[in-house]
Image (cartoon, helix red, strand yellow):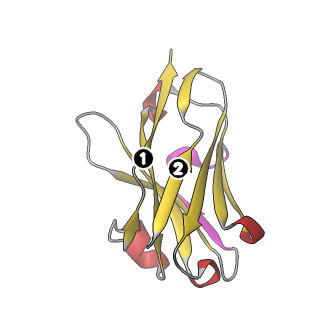
Amino acid sequence: EVQLVESGGGLVQAGGSLRLSCAASGFTFDDYAIGWFRQAPGKEREFVSCINIKDSRTYEIDSVKGRFTISSDNAKNTVFLQMNSLEPEDTAVYYCVADVLVSAIVVGRADYWGQGTQVTVSS
């Protein structure tokens, strides 16, 4: 059974930091790309960032460049999203996603989705 378990969300003041973790199981980690989506109240879900485990290439949207960093610990089948300089606009439920194709993740068609973790940034 495929599982993506997110952790690390919480409440933080603007300018603060959080690190999200996504523990993956049930598939061959090295064959996949793992990423993060977010959905704010009343808004459509939005691709944030992903990493292709095979070649460690990373992708992210412009609004988080320089603030968010995605990385992986392949020995632990875990992906991290380090979020710095958080802004109230980053408030959302963050979902870990996985697919063999980066392109599927970017367009929101990943095969696997976690349950999500809430990130709230106060002003």
Can you tell which mark lies on residue 116? 1
Q: Which quadrant of the structure image shows residue 59?
A: bottom right
Q: Position of residue 39 (x, y in %)?
A: 34, 44
Find residue 51 and report its horizontal and vertical position in percent. Answer: 61, 68
Using a 10 Å C-alpha cutoff, classify the residue at mark 1 as few (fewer than 14 neighbours), some (14 to 19) or many (20 or more).
Answer: many
For this orientation, the residue located farthest to the left is 42
Find numbered disc 2 in the image and state the secondary structure of the residue it sits on: strand
Tell me where residue 1 appears, x and y as whole percent. 43, 73
* Residue at point 59%, 59% (across, down): 23
Please tell me the numbered disc located at residue 6.
2
Res. 73 image quadrant: bottom right
Query: Does 100 sit above or below residue 35?
Result: below
Amino acid carrying mark 2 in the image? Glu
- In terms of secondary structure, where does tag 1 sit? loop
The CA span between labels 1 and 2 is 6 Å
Residue drawn 59% across and 85% down? Answer: 31
Residue 61 visible in the snapshot: no
- Residue range of the region highlighted in magenta in the rendering: 57-66
Residue at 66 percent across and 61 percent down: it is 78
Say if 67 sits above or below 45 in the image: above
Q: Would you say 84 lies left or right of 32 here?
A: right
Between 32 and 62, the one lying in front of the other is 32
Specify whether 77 is left or right of 87: right
**Could you tell which of marks 1 and 2 lies nearer the N-terminus?**
2
Whether 64 is drawn above or below 109: the answer is above
Up-down: is 96 above or below 105? above
